[in-house]
Amino acid sequence: MNILYHCGKYFIFLTKVFGKPERGRVYLRQTIIEIEKIGLGSMPIVAIMSVFMGAVITIQTASSLSGGWIPMSTVGYATRESILLEFSPTIIALILAGKVGSNIASEIGTMRVTEQIDALDIMGINSAGYLVFPKIIAAVLINPFVIVVSMFLGVFGGWLAAYASGILIPSVYVEGIQQQFIPFHVTYSLIKTLFFAFAITSVSAYHGYYVNGGALEVGAGSTKAVVYSSIVILLLNYVLTQLLLI
Amino acid sequence: MIEVIGLHKEFEGRTVLNDINFTFETGKCNLVIGQSGSGKTVLLKCMVGLFQPDQGQVLYHGRDYHAMPEKDRKEVRKEIGMVFQGGALFDSQTVEENVMFPLTMFSKMSMEEKIERVNFCLKRVNLTNVNKLYPAEISGGMKKRVAIARAIALNPKYIFFDEPNSGLDPQTSIVIDDLIAEITHEYGITTVINTHDMNSVMQMGENIIFIYKGQQEWTGNSQSIVESENENLNNFVFASDLFKKMRQSLREKK
């Protein structure tokens, strides 16, 4: 019952978020600010994660295949597919749920407990729309670019590992990443990214917006935001994969 | 003028406000007084629409606020300014941006006009050279004044103050009280002040409602409060020896 209650409340919250904006230009300016915060602000962690994960996947795959009958170029293929299909869209989304999600929930939650949201409501402003709509739009617009950069850096990380460790000849790795490339896999990843971006921002904002109490509840709301957006990401990942790949 | 008629509010079966009837008059400092937990803030939040009352009406110059469609309610909200206990300034915006915010959202002023209006409002609350500072960089008293400047930016008809003196020293409290009274009389605003500061009651109480355990216990002004024989009111207002002596001396003079 509790889940149903929160699902219903979440969808009512979304109708408020997508209500008519008071001043479109202000929302546009907020969206640009959020693009910088959500997208560009996440780039360093995404870059580091992507390079190292690509490198680790390459070393693990190469060490498993060495000495066998499978050609070593498969390492490049496996790295590319792992990064394109799962690592970049899903694992990075989970990391962003932690970084961006907790930030959104604590920011909006603090505004709630310090009566800043009440101040917006009394002014006649749709507080949910003003605070959350630009964040959702910004994430949906910028996250696909972040994920494309992550894909590139992940594959590059694999090449770097091959070059640095000597476990694999870099040219063989490059040969592998060009094998049996299916462009739809990139489209599939980007479709997933759009859904994940929406889930991270809206679920986290929901948990921040309905915080009731003080600093302790803001912290609890922030934790819930990360937990529930991660669960929603995993559920969406399964559903979208079944819908798009089978 | 704001009329509250038969207002009743419950939370999870517990009555917080019961049958409140009061008229908040235009151009006057209307005070809502009572102990902590008596229902003052709930009354204020019912009046501004943050809470929906279970029964009763709130009429803004005859317009039933809770019965009107959301579109009309938004129009009334543009006529309302509110100063919260902690100021409720937007942390991510400078003082100038905070005061400019309602102008940006609801006026068609050019940037030059908006800056001129912001400077006027800040000057009106005796603040200068703070435009580019963030709320975290100014004192509690200054935050209250910035919140007042933001509340008057759109020339509101009604201003609500939720405990404007909480957390301020007595001297700064007097400055804030004087400022509220000046603005109220200067612009003919219906001002509603929620307070339990006795200095404010005696200094600004032109029209007072005393709420005791969610009930409307007494109404009057700062003169009649001295003469009142209401036990609950006397226990609340004249709780300290200083105020007891002050009442005694005022009664002796009469």
Image: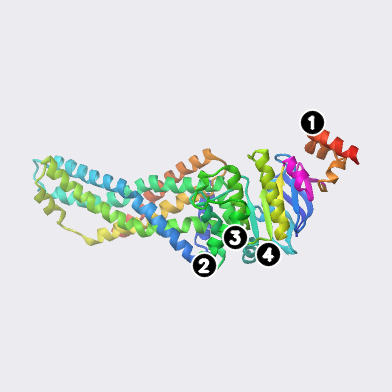
Q: Identify the secondary structure beneath mark 2.
A: loop
- Tell me: A38 left or right of B161: left
Q: Kindly identify which numbered label has been placed on residue B110.
A: 2
Q: Identify the secondary structure beneath mark 4.
A: loop
Front one among B3 and A139: B3
Report if residue B12 is visible in the image. Answer: no
Amino acid type assigned to the residue bearing label 2 in the image: Ser
Q: CA distance from mark 3 to mark 1?
A: 44 Å
Query: As drawn, which residue projects farthest toward the top?
Result: B241
Location of the C terminus of chain B by quadrant is: top right
Q: Kindly identify which numbered label has been placed on residue A124.
A: 3
Marks 1 and 4: in contact by CB < 8 Å? no
Find residue B217 and report its image quarter.
Answer: top right
Amino acid type assigned to the residue bearing label 1 in the image: Asp
- Where in the figure is residue A38, as x and y percent of width and height? 38, 52
- Tell me: A31 left or right of B38: left
Kindly indicate whether the residues beneath marks 4 and 1 are on one polypeptide chain: yes
Q: CA distance from mark 4 to mark 2?
A: 32 Å
- Tell me: A96 left or right of A127: left
- Where in the figure is residue A128, as x and y percent of width and height? 52, 56
Q: Chain of mark 1?
A: B
Amino acid type assigned to the residue bearing label 3 in the image: Gly
Label 4: few (<14), some (14–19) or many (≥20) C-alpha neighbours in 10 Å: few
The disc, 1 or 2, on the residue closer to the chain's N-terminal end is 2
In the image, residue B192 lies in the stretch drawn in magenta: no
Look at mark 1 in the image and give the residue it sits on.
B241
Look at mark 4 in the image and give the residue it sits on.
B68
The disc, 4 or 1, on the residue closer to the chain's N-terminal end is 4
